[in-house]
Image: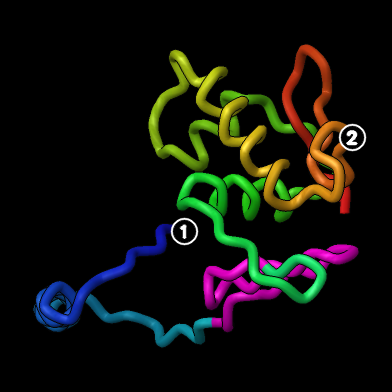
C-alpha cells in the first residue's frame, strides 16, 4: 500500500487521471478504513493525524522518526533488521543503512523512552536489529 500526500492541484490532476482510466477499466468500489491508533503503555500513535502522544503530551518527531516508530510499532515483538527498517522507511535499497537507522533510533529513543539508556519500547537485538515491545 502506498500513501501519498497531495496538494489541491495535484489531487485534481490525479482525479482526472483516475476518471480517464475508469472509462476503460471497471473498478470495484472500495471502503477505506480509518487509519488506526496504536496504543501502547503510555504511548499513543494517531496515524490519521500523524501525531504521537506520550503520557498525554505531544511528541514532535521528524518524518523519519515517525515512520520508523510506526513501522516498528506495527510489528510488535518482531525483530527487524536495519536493512528492513531502512528499506521500509527510506524507500530505497539498504547499501549503507546501518548508521542512518541507528541515528534515527537513537533520536527516537531520546524523545519517547522514559529512560533512553534503558529503553522500554525499542529494544536492540544485538547483531540483528531492533524490535518493538509495548
User: Does 49 lie within the magenta span?
Assistant: yes
Q: Is residue 14 left or right of residue 28?
A: left
Residue 21 on image: x %, y %: 15, 74
**Relative to 103, does residue 1 appear above or below in the rendering?**
below
Q: Which mark is residue 1?
A: 1
Residue 8 on image: x %, y %: 18, 81
Comparing 97 with 34, the one in front is 97
- Where does the magenta region start and end? 33-52
Q: Is residue 109 left or right of residue 28?
A: right
Label 2, secondary structure: give it: loop
Comparing 110 with 40, the one in front is 110
Residue 11 on image: x %, y %: 19, 78
Q: Which mark is residue 52?
A: none
User: Does 115 lie within the magenta span?
Assistant: no
Comparing 57 with 90, the one in front is 57
Residue named by callout 2: 118
Comparing 75 with 66, the one in front is 66
Amino acid at each position: 500500500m502506498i500513501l501519498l500526500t497531495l496538494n489541491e492541484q495535484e489531487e485534481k490532476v490525479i482525479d482526472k487521471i483516475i476518471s480517464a482510466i475508469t472509462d476503460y477499466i471497471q473498478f470495484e468500489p472500495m471502503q477505506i478504513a480509518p487509519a488506526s491508533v496504536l496504543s501502547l503503555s503510555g504511548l499513543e500513535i494517531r496515524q490519521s493525524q500523524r501525531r504521537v502522544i506520550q503520557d498525554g503530551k505531544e511528541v514532535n518527531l521528524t518524518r523519519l522518526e515517525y515512520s520508523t516508530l510506526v513501522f516498528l510499532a506495527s510489528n510488535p515483538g518482531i525483530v527487524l533488521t536495519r536493512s528492513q527498517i531502512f528499506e521500509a522507511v527510506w524507500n530505497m535499497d539498504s547499501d549503507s543503512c546501518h548508521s542512518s537507522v541507528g541515528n534515527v533510533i537513537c533520536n527516537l529513543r531520546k524523545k519517547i523512552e522514559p529512560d533512553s539508556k534503558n529503553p522500554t519500547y525499542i529494544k536492540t537485538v544485538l547483531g540483528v536489529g531492533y524490535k518493538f515491545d509495548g
